[in-house]
Image (spheres, rainbow, N blue to C red):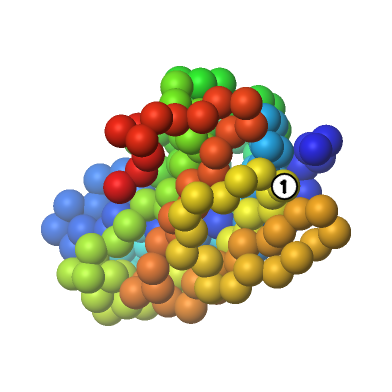
Amino acid sequence: MTIRAGKVIGLGAALMVLALAACYLPNKFMSEIRLGRTGDFALSFKGELVWAPLYREIRQGHLSAAELADKLAAIKADLIRDTNFSKVDSLGDGRFQVEYEREGHLGDSEQVTFVRRNAIILMIRGTPNGLITVNGNTLKPSDSQAATGMGLDIEGEFRIVTDGLVKENNATTVKPFGPYRVYIWKIQNAFSPSPHFVMQREGVWPSKSQEPK
């Protein structure tokens, strides 16, 4: 399977009312992973990223216009340090319209995170037993309620397109696409289940004790 970065896609992030430390929330997004049977991948995200701590400060009226401008500029500068972002436009209230594409080959003991390791929305992880796992960061019910109460939405669509041997998934829908299958997650709100997906890398087979529980 030859991988090319698509024009699409993202999911879940942790939101705490009293301790919004470092979390982005995705909204109005389309996100996709194209995952080859040997571990080649292409990840894309197109939509909004909401920096929850700033969104909360704005809603509470804690910032002057100058302070807000400085914080928006700092967040944008932090995002564009990652050259996989081709677009980062501030929407003015802690929300950023972004486009992101990354591709590569996932090693046996390697992980790829979006947005980054300390602010994970999505993680792809390879393990020596040949499994490749994709997980969205799960919101606790209390955090989902907190996000909803602040007017923060999480809405969009996430897809995985693969020709590999899939062992587990909780996709909303699965569709054939030529020699591939498309696993689709419809994210309707902060309470929607986070994506979970496990694939067996071709040529590496786990023992029974290594199978996912």
Asked whether 121 or 135 is in front, the reply is: 135
Residue 118 position, x and y percent, is: 35, 35
Pointer 1 local density, CA inside 10 Å: few below 14, some 14–19, many at least 20: some
Q: Is residue 50 above or below residue 202?
A: below
Q: Quadrant of the N terminus?
A: top right
Q: Residue at x 45, y 22 (%)?
A: 128
Q: Is residue 135 visible?
A: yes
Callout 1 amino acid: Asp
* Circle 1 residue: 163
Q: Is residue 36 above or below residue 166?
A: above
Q: Residue at x 36, y 35 (%)?
A: 208
Left or right relative to 11: residue 164: right
Q: Residue at x 25, y 45 (%)?
A: 21
Left or right relative to 140: residue 200: right
Q: Residue at x 41, y 62 (%)?
A: 194
Q: Is residue 94 visible?
A: no
Q: Is residue 51 above or below residue 199?
A: below
Residue 50 position, x and y percent, is: 46, 58
Asked whether 145 or 109 is in front, the reply is: 109
Residue 85 position, x and y percent, is: 66, 39
